Image (spheres, grey):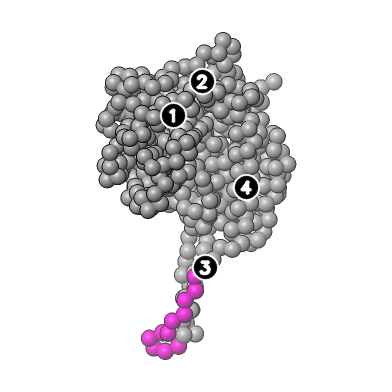
Amino acid sequence: MTTLMRNYVNGEWITTGRTFPTINPVDGSHVADVSEADQDTVDRAVKAARAAMDGAWGKLTAAERSALLHKVADGIEARFDEFLEAEVADTGHSYPHARAIDIPRGAANFRIFADLIKAYPNEAYEMAAPEGGAVLNYSHRRPLGVVAVIAPWDLPLLLLSWKVAPAMAAGNAVIAKPSEETPATATLLAEVMAEAGVPPGAFNLIHGFGPNSAGEFLTTHPGIDGITFTGESHTGTIIMKAAAERVKPVSFELGGKNPGIVFADCDFDAAVDGIAKAAFSNGGQICMCTERVYVERPIFDKFVAALKRKAEALVPGRPADPGVDMPPMISAEHRDKVLSYYRLAVGEGATVVTGGGVPQFGDERDEGFFVQPTIWTGLGDTARICREEIFGPCCHVAPFDSEDEVIARANDTHYGLCASIWTQNLARGHRVAHAVQAGLVWVNSWYLRDLRTPFGGVKMSGIGREGGMHSLNFYSEPSNICVKF
C-alpha cells in the first residue's frame, strides 16, 4: 500500500482533500502520496505556532530548549536507517553519500545549535550619566516569533535542519515546508519532534508547492514574523516582495554560477580532483557546485583532458550499486531543464568535450532522470550557459592569461555565492580570494566547511548569513536595556 505523508500541526497529523505523488528519480516509480496543505491548514499552523510562543514552548529556558534539541538529534540517530531509506528514495543519492553526509549532518545540526545557544553572548557597557550617576546598558535577545522555513530538495534533511535547529534553539516556533520533491525525511523529523517531547505548535510541517499552494500561503501570511528560504533566485524575489509588505526579516541562500580558478602553479592532480567534485558532485545539484572553470593557458589543454577522464569515470546507477557516484536529476522536469541547456550549448557553438546526453542502461533506470556529466569549451563569457544557473553535472572550461583578467571574468555575473581558487602561491591565493565577489571562497579545496563560519551569498545569491552565531543572530532580535543607578 502506498504511504500517505501528512501535515503535522499543533502536535497532530492532518490530512487534506488534495494529494500529490512523490517519484523515485532513479526509475520513475511512485514512492508515496503527500497531503497538500491548504490555506486552512497553514492558518492552523500559524495559530498553533503563536500559541506555542505564548505557552509551553515560549516559557522554556535556553538550557531546556538545548536539552530538547539534543533529544531530537538522538531521535534521528536512533532511526538512522529509516531516515536513510527515506532520503535515498526521495533523492536517488547513493547509500554511501546519504550514510556519510545527509543523515549525520541532519543530526549534527541539532547538536551544534543546541550547544551554541547555551553560550550565546550578550553585550554590556557601563557609562556615566551626564547629570551624574552610573548607567548600565545591556542587550537582551528575543526570538523573532513564528518563523517560516522553506527548504530545497538537493540535500533535504541537511538543509532543513540547518534552518530549523537554530530557529528553535533561539526560541522561535517553526513552520517548515520542505520541497514537494523531497518530503519524506521532513515527515520523519516531525515524528522525532513528537517523540522527543517538543511542545505542540513549536514545530509544524506543511507539504505543498509554491504558487497558489503551501509556499505562497505561508510566505504571505500576516502571522509570520520571519522567513528563511534556500532555492532559486527568482523564487527569492517573489518571497521578498511578499515580505516587504509587512517588513518581515528574510534570510535567503539563492542561486549561483560559481567560478573555479585554476592557476598554472597549482597542485595539478589536486586541482583536477577538486574541480571534478565541484562540478559533478550530487549530479551538480548543490548550490556550491562550479559551472564556470577558468584555467591558466599553459595548462589548459592538459587540464581539460584530465577533467574529461574524471567525468567519464563517473558511475551513474542505483543507490545500492557498487561505486555509484552520479545520481539522477531530482525530477523529470529538472532533467528536461538540464537537457535544454545541453542543447543550447551546442546551439551557441560550444565544443562538447564529453557528455551532452542521457546514459542508456537497458533496464528500469531508463525510466529515471539521469543525464551525462558534461564538459564544454569554446564559448565566450556572454554565452547563456556561462551566465545562467543550470544546476546539473556540467561546466564550461575557458583559458585565461592573467590574474587581473580572471578576477574580472569571475566577477562578471549577477551571482556571488562561492568560488574556488587553485594555486600553490599562498600570497596569490589570499589576494585573489579577497578580490572575488563571493560569500565563500575556498583556496585549494572545495566544500570544506566549518559550521561556525558565515555562509551566504552576495548579489543575486542571497541576503544574510547562516552558520554558528550568524544563524542565531538572524533568528533573534536584540533589545538594549538602559539602567540608571
What is the number of the mark on residue 307? 1
Crowd band around label 2 with a 10 angstrom C-alpha radius: few (<14), some (14–19), many (20+): many
Residue extent of the magenta highlight:
122-133
**Amino acid at dot 1:** Leu
Residue 326 seen in the figure = yes
Disc 4 is placed on an element classified as helix
- Which residue shows up at 50% across the image and 42% down it? 447
The residue to which callout 2 is attached is 369
Disc 3: which residue: 122
Q: CA distance from mark 4 to mark 3?
A: 25 Å
- Earlier-in-chain disc, 1 versus 3: 3
**Mark 4 and mark 3 residues within 8 Å of each other at the beta carbon:** no
> Alpha carbon of mark 1 to alpha carbon of mark 2: how far?
24 Å
Q: Which residue is under mark 4?
A: 108
| Residue found at x 61% / y 22% | 318
Residue at 36% from the left image edge and 25% from the top image edge: 376
Q: Hey, what amino acid is under mark 4?
A: Ala
Coordinates of residue 382 in the picture (x, y in percent):
26, 31
4 vs 1, front mark = 1
Q: Quadrant of residue 307?
A: top left
